[in-house]
Image: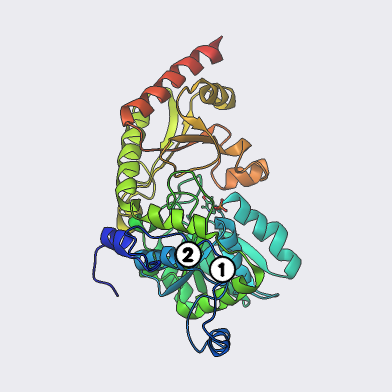
């Protein structure tokens, strides 16, 4: 393992030099690679030597992105995928078979919930949800055919945390694959493999790109598991475009410094909201009032870039609040340089029933803010303006 620090690894790992002494990594936009001889081709296809054959299998630009991410997550191996969802899907479809069961935390990303409830049942792969706050429930819900435990921490958008050390021990005790979606925290804030995760899945669309430019994903972890997933991906085709691989590799160079500022701005905003009389409740892992504050301090370096809150006055006021924002963007994405605001119940989690939403902590008026890198005073200024304006509108 490389002894350099996180930031240095993220900046200095360069594997895809094009041979022109270029300082910045080139983009290898090619669908295939040539063979020196017929014998070279034969040896490559028979895994006797390592090398690039075809971009659906591997590509030097994508290899650089994934090599960096493996160093940052302290993972043995990994693959890049076209989106976060193709990472989630491949990490499960590549390792599980008909009859297998997944035990998952109840609050998962909306599309992951659709995979569990609508897609995998078609192939006889079932799931059970366990409450993120109820540790006893987890062991009781492990079945004879359970093969994988899947969880997000912090969860989206409820910002609930699960104890990764405890979960790692539970998975080990029952010989289950622990798969953690580390999209919200990024390896800069949290390294699930250190706590016992076998694989870590990412939507690179969020903080890894960090600038709202591209969709991408990654799966990193244990060599033997990645080998199986790589076989599945090679033949089912969720390959990342090398252009996007280049964007993501360059983005990792600034991950640490961006996350520092995202977290600083988020904590300042959360503290401001906590003291504001027009706010019903606010949630942020590094606020003392968060129920998992101690756990957050244990397994996360900083609190992350997401803050959720509820404006007083319910759904109507919430809508007026969103419509009164002047600078902050109304969009479903998160992890951007720009602060984005989402009403979860009507957008990202609209496909869930009202009851399912409440089970995962999505109240009707819940607003999710992905705190960006603008000056924090301007972010707070816009939110304060919208709080005041929405009060007038709601009273009128
Ligand atoms: C966005 C997101 C995904 C899906 O990623 P895409 O890149 O949009 O496919 C999965 N998990 C979490 C926690 C996310 O926020």
Q: Nearer the viewer, residue 225 or 122?
A: 225
Q: Position of residue 223 (x, y in %)?
A: 46, 78
Could one spot residue 227 in this view of the protein? yes
The residue at the point 33 percent across, 37 percent down is 265
In the rendered image of this protein, does residue 344 appear above or below residue 79?
Answer: above
Which residue matches tag 2?
62
Q: Position of residue 285 (x, y in %)?
A: 37, 46
**Residue 82, image quadrant:** bottom right
State if disc 1 and disc 2 touch (CB < 8 Å).
yes
Q: Nearer the viewer, residue 363 or 339?
A: 339
Q: Nearer the viewer, residue 248 or 105?
A: 248
Dot 2 or dot 1: first in sequence order is 1
Q: Position of residue 34 (x, y in %)?
A: 54, 76
Q: Secondary structure at mark 2?
A: helix
Around disc 2, counting alpha carbons within 10 Å, would you say few (fewer than 14), some (14 to 19), or many (20 or more)?
Answer: many
Tag shown at residue 120: none
The residue at the point 39 percent across, 43 percent down is 305
In the rendered image of this protein, does residue 221 appear above or below residue 368?
Answer: below
Q: Nearer the viewer, residue 201 or 212?
A: 212
Inter-mark Cα distance, 2 to 1 = 9 Å
The residue at the point 48 percent across, 79 percent down is 51
Could one spot residue 288 in this view of the protein? no
Residue with the most extreme right position: 122
Q: Position of residue 272 (x, y in %)?
A: 33, 29
Which residue matches tag 1?
55
């Amino acid at each position: 393992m490389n002894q350099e620090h996180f930031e240095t690894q993220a900046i200095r790992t360069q594997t895809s030099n094009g041979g022109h002494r270029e300082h910045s990594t080139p983009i290898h936009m090619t669908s295939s690679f040539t063979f020196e001889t017929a014998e070279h081709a034969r040896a490559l296809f028979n895994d006797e030597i390592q090398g690039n054959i075809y971009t659906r299998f591997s590509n030097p630009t994508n290899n650089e992105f994934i090599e960096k991410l493996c160093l940052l997550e302290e993972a043995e191996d990994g693959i890049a995928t076209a989106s976060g969802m193709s990472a989630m899907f491949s990490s499960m479809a590549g390792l599980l078979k008909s009859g297998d069961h997944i035990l998952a935390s109840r609050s998962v990303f909306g599309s992951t919930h659709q995979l569990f409830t609508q897609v995998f049942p078609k192939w006889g792969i079932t799931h059970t949800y366990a409450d993120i706050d109820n540790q006893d429930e987890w062991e009781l819900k492990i079945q004879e055919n359970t093969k994988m435990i899947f969880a997000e921490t912090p969860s989206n958008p409820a910002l609930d945390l699960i104890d990764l050390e405890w979960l790692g021990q539970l998975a080990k005790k029952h010989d289950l694959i622990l798969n953690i979606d580390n999209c919200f925290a990024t390896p800069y804030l949290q390294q699930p493999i250190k706590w016992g995760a076998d694989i870590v899945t990412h939507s690179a669309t969020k903080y890894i790109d960090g600038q709202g430019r591209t969709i991408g994903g990654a799966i990193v972890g244990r060599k033997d598991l990645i080998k199986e997933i790589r076989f599945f991906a090679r033949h089912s085709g969720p390959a990342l475009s090398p252009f996007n691989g280049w964007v993501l590799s360059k983005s990792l160079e600034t991950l640490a410094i961006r996350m520092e500022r995202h977290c600083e701005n988020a904590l300042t905003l959360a503290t401001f909201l906590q003291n504001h009389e027009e706010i019903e409740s606010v949630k942020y892992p590094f606020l003392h009032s968060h129920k998992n504050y101690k756990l957050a301090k244990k397994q996360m370096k900083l609190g992350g870039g997401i803050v959720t809150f509820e404006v007083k006055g319910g759904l109507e006021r919430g809508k007026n609040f969103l419509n009164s924002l002047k600078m902050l963007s109304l969009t479903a994405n998160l992890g951007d340089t720009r602060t984005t605001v989402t009403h979860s119940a009507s957008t990202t989690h609209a496909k869930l029933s009202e009851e399912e939403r409440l089970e995962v902590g999505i109240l009707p008026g819940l607003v999710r803010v992905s705190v960006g890198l603008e000056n924090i005073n301007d972010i707070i200024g816009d939110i304060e303006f919208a709080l005041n304006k929405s009060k007038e509108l709601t009273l009128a």
